[in-house]
Amino acid sequence: MIMNIDRKILVMTVVAALLAFAAPAAAFEGEKELYEAAKKEKAFTWYTAHYDSESAAAICNGFEKKYPGITCNYIRTTAQVAYQRLAQDQKAGIAGASVISSTDQGHYGRMKQDGWLMKYRPKSLSELIDAFKSFNDPDDTFFATAAGLVLITYNTMVVSEAEAPRKWTDLLDPRWKGKLSIGHPGFSGYVGTWVVQMRKLYGWDYFKKMELNKPRIGRSINDTVTMLNAKESWVASGPSGTTLQSRDKGNPLAVVYPEDGAVLMVSPSGILKNAPAPNAARLFMEYLFSKECNEIVVKYRGDSINKHVRPLPGAKPLTEVKTIRPTYEEILKGIPEVKEQFRDTFGI
Amino acid sequence: MAPRDASAVTEVVRTGSLAARPVGYRQRWRHVDKSVFLWLFLIGVLLVLVINPLARLFWVSLQHVDTGALTLENYVTAYGRWRYLEALVNSLVLGLSVAVVCTLFGVPMAWAVSRTDMPGKGLVWAAILGTFIVPSYLGAVAWILLAGPNAGWLNRAYMWLTGAAAGPFNIYSMTGLVLIVAAYSFPYMFVFTRSALDMISSEMEDAASTLGAGILRTTLRVTLPLTLPAILAAIIVVFLEAIALFGAPALIALPGRFQVITTMLWQFFEFPPKVQVAAAYSMPLLAITVGLFWLQRRLTGRKGYVAMTGKGGERRPVRLGKWRWVMLGYCLFVTSLSFFLPMVVVLQAAFAKAWGRGFSLDNLTLHNVRFVLVDQPLTKAATLHTFVYGATAAAIALALALCIAYIVQRRLVPFGNALSFLAMAPFVIPGIVLAIGFYAAYTQPPLLLYGTAWILILAFATRFLPIAYANSDAAIRGINPELEDAVRILGGGRLMAIRRVVMPLLKRALAGAFILVFIPATRELSAAIFLYTTGTQVLSVLLFDKSDEGNFEILASIGLILVVITVALVMLGFRLVGRDFMLRRTSA
């Protein structure tokens, strides 16, 4: 069964590769002109919270290889720090970053409102997975460029596949008492979105019941990976990317795509109005949708947002997973609310 | 200036009397103590490094979040909830407990290494140095593995030995947090106390034993009281360090279900960020600092602690007999908690393909270390930056601290206490807030520093100025002003007295202070994360990224490299300063 899926993936990858070779030289209309204009700007800076630093470095390298003569400088931080830095830049009238990639949806509404973002509709948008198009700004100031899942994760040395939870409500089972790990919505946008979604599905009662299991609460959603590896926790509500990356190294981890739906995280990027390198920024936006870029992303266990790029074995493509997600408004309104509720229920 | 002073000396000697010379403008100029200009310059520097960012912080705390109008609303928001106040109380408990534990750890060890014939001093010192280098959040992750309630190695060992169903240790508790923070802060206590002990000559102890006091009584009644200023300074430093720390509390306190000031402060930086409220919330930290200073002055003010006088002192080690092995045992126990045990965890992770699989031969790999050292160009550049910035910042902080401590101690300016407060104040400002103050102050002309290495260096220097200051202050307290007066009576200027008398006497204490600033600067995170740009990455930021990314193998490898390089550099430094510098056994 698993062999079959793997083989299918292999065949599809080969087909996709062949298609790529057959494709015309220009990835999108006007690529050559944009590249020429960008080359004159020489370099640009990208504030990103979308990936870990290795992926960000690889993505930048890929860009520099595809478009020689332009240097891609990345500053990889958490979403809050990225926003803080940008806010300081704007206040001081410093044009530092050209592209901003935050994981916090709320940032974009604010940045747009404050007039920090530039309108640009990427020509490569047709490459974007169709389901994600609804996350783009109708006014063309930001677009979905990264995705990830919150799902159930576990340590395979202490939990067998048969015992592993299948759906979110299984985490409330008393046998996971003291052995469950989650992140904190006050520290992680991924966790915040997950909490909003759980509340939407099962009401706040879900977390009151969860508190009976005394979950181990970390900061980042990635802390669950450390907890599972240390066997301090056995099951977790964790991220797809980091967990699979750690599993690729040989750590005893596995992921379950919950029957009631994996929580989908979609993160946009935008170009800044005062970008010192506006053309390089536009070219980079195009690149973020490209096959080359998304192949690098899946290599580092991120999820592709390009509809033609398949994940590595062990992960399912987003188009084949049952995903659930609160609407943009629900997130915007819900995250501050659940932070308070969370603090009331769990005491921190 | 000093040579001119020197020629003045000879002139005075030649003519016999100054009064015999005509009094003119030049003459008066010659009589002005030129060091005044240096002091003025220093105050200017403090203005740039401390007062300006602090004033901005205070100003911001009074501004309305949206409109920027003057208001006290931020204070109401910051203290209007029991949850916020509770975090404040937790931080005080943490700070006080850490201060106590650090004293219990650090003072006996400092005494043993400095004054006794305990064996294995080199090993103990190396382990303390190692402890100091390990970033506390790396140590905290290691301790989760050691004393996690479900799967901690210590708990499993206990269960295996006793057959019990559960182990006794739970790192996710206030006790656990105190232990971890103390384990990574006690080196301050050790170094402060030790440099004070090193200055005390055996003659004072001899006087006590001549009068019939035993070793214990002499130590408790004579030796240790003489080091009180140093111990108090260290208590202030570790207390402030404990309440301003973010990494370890975030890893331990949150899963342990309690909050401290720094984890609470984080909330105010959530989107939309309320820097104004954060500023208001950090104001009591400044008040606490003022209070601590007042207390320190009350406790030490009226007594004399001058140990270093013009008379040559002899220092002999106290013979402990078989107790020296007990002492060594204690030192090894403490350093096991802080260094040896966590390092086993770090080594295991750094050389493991997948650390979650535990110890086994086929799980060993050099890949992680190679990746960090060879494959990732970023690490190489960051390593270089880390040490260059750290050393520069340490030199600046130390020079500044020494001058301020000297001015204050010798009462050269009227508002000395204010100066010493300013030198200590940066310590309580959470790094992130300090960084924002710096950012706000120096991202625009006339001082456009953002984007250069200088903003990092100056932020590091400011952040660790208190350590340099506390240390310099304690050291200068130990020097009898008579020594300088002798120079001045002979006609030398103050600068000459400093250069020829004070500096040589302080050489060793200063080298210690340099290390105390250099090491934390190499692992400084919270300011760095805001101020670095693409060309100025440092290792701590890379480390923190990894801790945020669940990538413990690489985290451990970077940590290991940081420890190995820093130990090597510091050891090299000792060689350069003098072979007997830290491992000296007896004579001065």
Image (cartoon, coloured by chain):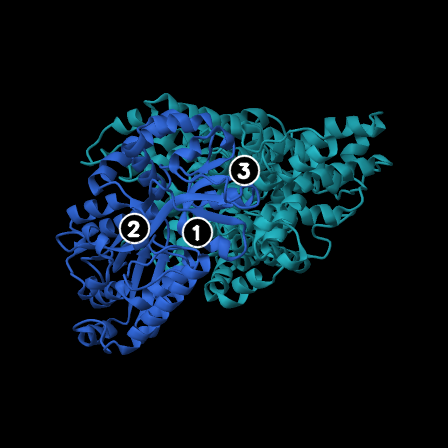
Chain colours: A blue, B cyan
Amino acid type indicated by mark 3: Gln
Same chain for mark 3 and mark 2? The answer is: no
- In-front residue for pair B462/B381: B381
Subunit of label 1: A
Q: Residue furthest left?
A: A139
Q: Quadrant of residue B165?
A: top right
Mark toward the viewer: 1 or 3: 1
Q: Crowdedness of circle 2 by 10 Å Cα count: few (<14), some, many (20+)?
A: many
**Vertical position of residue B519 compared to residue B59: above or below:** below
Residue A97: % across, % down: 27, 58
Residue at which label 3 appears: B409
Residue at which label 2 appears: A102
Residue ID at (42%, 29%): A210
**Vertical position of residue B280 compared to residue A314: above or below:** above
Subunit of label 2: A
- In-front residue for pair B248/B42: B248
Q: Crowdedness of circle 1 by 10 Å Cα count: few (<14), some, many (20+)?
A: many
**Vertical position of residue B228 compared to residue B368: above or below:** above
Amino acid type indicated by mark 1: Thr
Residue B25: % across, % down: 41, 53
For the residues marked 2 and 1, what is the alpha-carbon distance in whole angstroms? 18 Å
For the residues marked 3 and 2, what is the alpha-carbon distance in whole angstroms? 51 Å
